[in-house]
Amino acid sequence: MAKKINFLTPKAIVKELEKYVIGQDRAKKSVAIALRTRFRRNSVSAEIRDDIVPKNILLIGPTGVGKTEIARRIAKLSDSPFVKVEASKFTEVGYMGRDVESMIRDIVETAYISEKIKETEQVIEKAKQNAEELLLDLLVPPPPRVPKKSSTNSGASGKSSYANTREKFRTMLRDGKLDDRFVEMEVKSSSRPPAPVIEIFSQSGMDDMGQDFKDMFSNMFPKQKKLEKIRVSEAYDILVREESERLVDVDKVIKNAIQKVENSGLVFIDEIDKIASREKAYGPDVSREGVQRDLLPIIEGSNVMTKYGAVRTDHILFIAAGAFHVSKPSDLIPELQGRFPIRVEMDSLSKGDFVKILTKPKGALIKQYIALLKTENVTLNFTEDGIERIAEIAEEVNLKTENIGARRLHTMLEKVMESVSFDAPFRTSKKIVVDKVYVDDKLVDIVKDEDLSRYIL
């Protein structure tokens, strides 16, 4: 991670975030500092390194303003293990629901998969070579071994003939000429792509029970093998998968995954305002406060047991977010408030922000629609007044109804482009101009009727 962001100063990090998130300069600055602090921590002496804990961040603002996107982009930028969880899905120990430690198990699982993919990429060439040799053994079985006493020149010539035949088959295999042939081979039950898994245990303390049972039984009983006739192309893929599994050092993968989580993990806790106690009362509020108290030891630093071993949470960066429409950050228990020393209030999006969101980011919505309809040979041209009108209506509807931020643009653009998208394959006119008049024609009646806009926009 240090190598990844060594060249990224806080200003450079903010600049990278601006490619994907419009506005929210204070939030970008806070996460940029938190990310750079991690690099600084890895550069200090070991004596003081353990004492430097991350400064967790609380993002306060309505939905759709970029809270999740900022956290997700920061994790991708720093190549950090990342997991997003909803606080409202957790309950305190003793209640039905997920326990808070499952978020750590989730991020470790994410890191394990990521590290395994990286290790597999390093051994994949060797796995392909091995798979090719094994497949050639099936296509051109080696000649029976001749006893030394009876070996003659004919035996040597037989070996030479076999080697030539094997090389011819190797050339045909690489050229794809043998793909439709069938070979008979032993297939392990785990070699084929996994079937969909039905989750049975999902209550408190049982998040990993289904997986644990699967692992336990797979270790107790040997993997089943059976002879099958398989196409060469499929057999090659199976052999590559088996060989790469064999060549990957699982202990190294687990060690790297845990180390990465402990030093650069990022947990994004959304909807934290839903577990804030609004008033002193009995009933559900007891569970809300219980979740907060269960979160405390994890956020301040503790050991969490996972199926890959114990994981320390002392240096995991936690970013919490909530709208806090009904409750306030001060409604959280004081101990939890103290674990989020950096608080950033997110800005509501204005018309100017909506215009930028529609046009500036790499994956801007307008760019998406232009690219999608180009596949049908339809050319879309969004004029400036058309884009401004969409942004203006989005701001207006957010003020009149529920403020859902930039997510309003998805609904509006889908409504604007509905007829074009439906008729695109059959249109005689392949050029569409989306201007102010076009947008008004599609949206103005809905915007005027406030009750209707609540349901459609």
Image (spheres, helix red, strand yellow):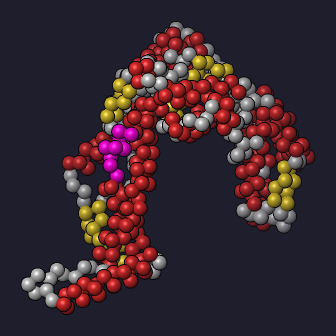
Rendered view: 325 above or below 349:
above
Q: Give the magenta-colored segment's residue range.
A: 248-256
Image location (x, y in percent) of residue 360: 76, 42
Left or right relative to 365: residue 202 = left
Q: Please tell me which residue is depicted at 39% across the width and 65% down the height of the picture.
A: 128
Q: Please tell me which residue is depicted at 78% across the width and 43% down the height of the picture.
A: 359
Image location (x, y in percent) of residue 90: 46, 27
Provide the major secondary structure of the magenta segment: helix
Q: Please tell me which residue is depicted at 30% across the width and 82% down the height of the picture.
A: 163
Image location (x, y in percent) of residue 136: 33, 75
Q: Can residue 287 be spotted in the picture?
A: no
Left or right relative to 245: residue 323 = right
Is residue 137 on the magenta stretch? no
Q: Can residue 354 be spotted in the picture?
A: yes
Is residue 253 on the magenta stretch? yes
Image location (x, y in percent) of residue 259: 40, 34
